[in-house]
Amino acid sequence: MTNGSAVRNAWAPAVATGWAVTVVRPSEPAAASPIDFTGMDDAALVAASVDGQREAFDVIVERHRRTVYQVCYRFVSNHEDASDLSQESFVRAWRGLENFRGQAALSTWLYRIAVNVCLNRVSAKAPATDPIESTDHFEDTRIEGAQALLLRQERAATVRKAIASLPKKQRATLILRTYHDMSHQQIADILGSSVGATKANFFHALANLKKLLGNQP
Amino acid sequence: MTHLTPDDLVDALDGALAQSRQTHLDACQPCRQQLAELRAVLGETASVVVPEPSPMFWEHLSVRVRAAIDAEPAVASGWTSWFRWPVLAPIAGLALVVMALMVAVPRQGAVVPDVEVNEQDTADISFAIVADLVGDIDWDTAMSAGLMVGPGAADQAMLELTAAEQQELTRLLTAELTRAKS
């Protein structure tokens, strides 16, 4: 920053004799006090996000990205598509944040968005699944024999493929019930159906899986 | 007694089977077999985990979401938010109705002369009077006196009406149209 005396000397020839040059240094702008969004609950984060505070939505993403990704992965069984669907789910959540009334938990609302994104995007045919080599990267082979591990991975891939081949509503119901421990009522709310229809979808999903897996080793 | 329905079997998997149906299940080997098979499939399905992605993936996902949201078109705010078809279309329609009424409906209280007059002469006289009155008024004076109507002023006036006022205006216009037709 320019020295005050240097400024005074520079101005001296320009002013009449006897005048004093006073250098007034503009005060430094007050540093914006950072808000700690990480300690806020979901409702406060939603309110702050709607208020235009993007950092608040970043915390929402950070808090729920794992569950949203897992829902998406269960639908498509491959990492790339699950990443894309997760991103799209959060972008849709951002767009619709003003409409979130808080009747349900934010996590349930995000589940609903993710499931709808997946149902809209996933085609009826089975999507490409990750190759067995790329799954379960962090298994400890010292505990389990390599051959047993390979068999388990193959079986897991078979189950994922069978799930991916289920009709969409059955797949959604099975995923939310089995992996996210949702009640039939919650699933019905998310899918916009009745509890009876949800139970029927769950039953048929299991029955179809039994057929699909029963024919394979 | 009938065998377990799909609904009953799901309740049984959840441990919420009604007592009467539980009694049947205890005594029915085919139903127990079916339930055991469903339970086995459910167990195997539940044991399949989602592969854990790279630890760096999560932050990468956050960055991607942030970038995608930044790329979203900004939400129009303030007066610019009025420039949307769902807002403009009804206002434009209402403005057309108002203009049509102004042209078609005779002013209330206007006296229709019983005698024939020379319209050309009347127009000339009226124009002469108006010209005489406003001839010396410049543009700025007229503006400051509120005699000028700016572009979009009628639309703006419509926007400032409350819902009740808009409803009342609609009622008045409808009544005026009915009166004009009769």
Image (cartoon, helix red, strand yellow):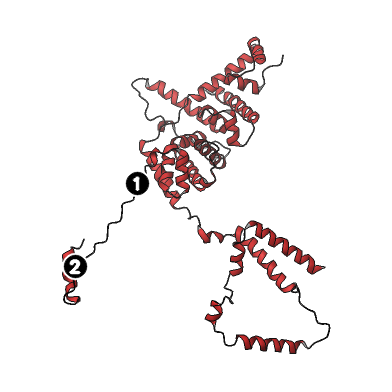
Kindly indicate whether the residue at mark 1 contacts the one at mark 2 (C-beta within 8 angstroms). no
Q: Secondary structure at mark 1?
A: loop
Foreground: A38 or A145?
Answer: A38
- Percent of width and height locating residue A182: 54, 29
Residue at position x 58%, y 36% from top?
A190
Residue at position x 67%, y 87% from top?
B127
**Which three-letter amino acid code belongs to the residue tagged 1?**
Pro
Q: Earlier in the sequence, mark 2 or mark 1?
A: 2
- Percent of width and height locating residue A45: 44, 42
Q: Chain of mark 1?
A: A
Q: Around disc 1, counting alpha carbons within 10 Å, would you say few (fewer than 14), some (14 to 19), or many (20 or more)?
A: few
Q: Would you say residue A166 is visible in this rendering?
A: no
Name the residue tied to disc 2: A7
* Residue A34, numbered circle: 1
Q: How many marks?
A: 2
Q: Around disc 2, counting alpha carbons within 10 Å, would you say few (fewer than 14), some (14 to 19), or many (20 or more)?
A: few
Q: Chain of mark 2?
A: A
Vertical placement of residue A175 versus B18, above or below: below
